[in-house]
Amino acid sequence: MCIRDSSGTSSAVGQFDYSNTNYTTALNEHMATTCTNAKAANVLVMTVSLDLDAIDGLAAKVRRKYRSAARVILLKRSPWSERKRFNLAHEPGHTVIAPSGGVADETAWRAGLPCGGTVQVFVERLEKEKGAAELLAKSVAAAEGRTGLVVATRLDDGSKQVYDRDETDLPDEIAERFSSAKSQLKTAPDGEVFLHAIVPAAEEAWIAAVTRRLTGSGR
């Protein structure tokens, strides 16, 4: 264990103890301290199961109706502890420096933050009084039947319209969500509409055939 890994830790971490147990204790304390500091700065830190191979973590600003935007850091649950610690130290930088926010590429590289971009995430509260139970039941049924749904939500008032794949005369933009299995934010004349594609992933089936040539008299 490098001596620097023990800096800022409690007396439970030995400065010259090179065991795996001591190293893990130091990492855990660093993670806890960083999360505490983030919380004090009104940044929410969450570990989630991100189904994205190329992303280990991301920093986001979440728009909330009638409230100020929330700053959130998502950490992928599967990477090893040291990678998580790096992600937790790295992602808050994007709340200050982001190439997509008008910062020069050279400045971003010097700060160690060349990665960047804009990801729009729609987060909503599911409430029973507003039909959440019915929507969840339809989603489960569509997943089990491998049919899928597209849910159109108006962001200004939260009203929804649910589309089934088997419906006739689907609008072109809804049919495209079923085909691509990708959600999309649409800007309409009367406001923004989030098209949430709840479509099961395609299944692959491999079929191998082996032929045997029979030779000989009478065959």
Image (cartoon, rainbow, N blue to C red):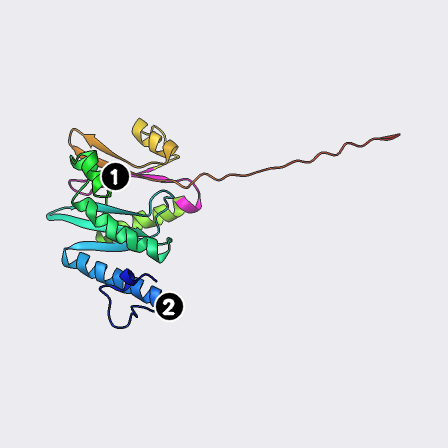
Q: Which of 138 and 123 is in front in this view?
A: 123
Callout 1: helix, strand or loop?
loop
The image shows residue 187 at horizontal and vertical percentages of 20, 31
Would you say residue 148 sits in the magenta stretch?
A: yes
Image quadrant occupied by the N terminus: bottom left
Residue at 21 percent across and 34 percent down: it is 105
Residue placed under numbered mark 2 in the picture: 21
First-in-chain label (2 vs 1)? 2
In the rendered image of this protein, does residue 72 appear above or below residue 31? above
216 horizontally vs 193: left or right: right
Q: Is residue 214 visible?
A: yes
Q: Residue at x 22, y 36 (%)?
A: 193
Q: Tell whether position 70 is magenta.
A: no
Which residue appears at 17% of the width and 34% of the height?
104
Stretch in magenta? 143-163
**According to the image, label 1 marks what residue?**
114
Within the image, what quadrant is residue 197 found in?
A: top left
Q: Which amino acid does label 2 sit on?
A: Thr
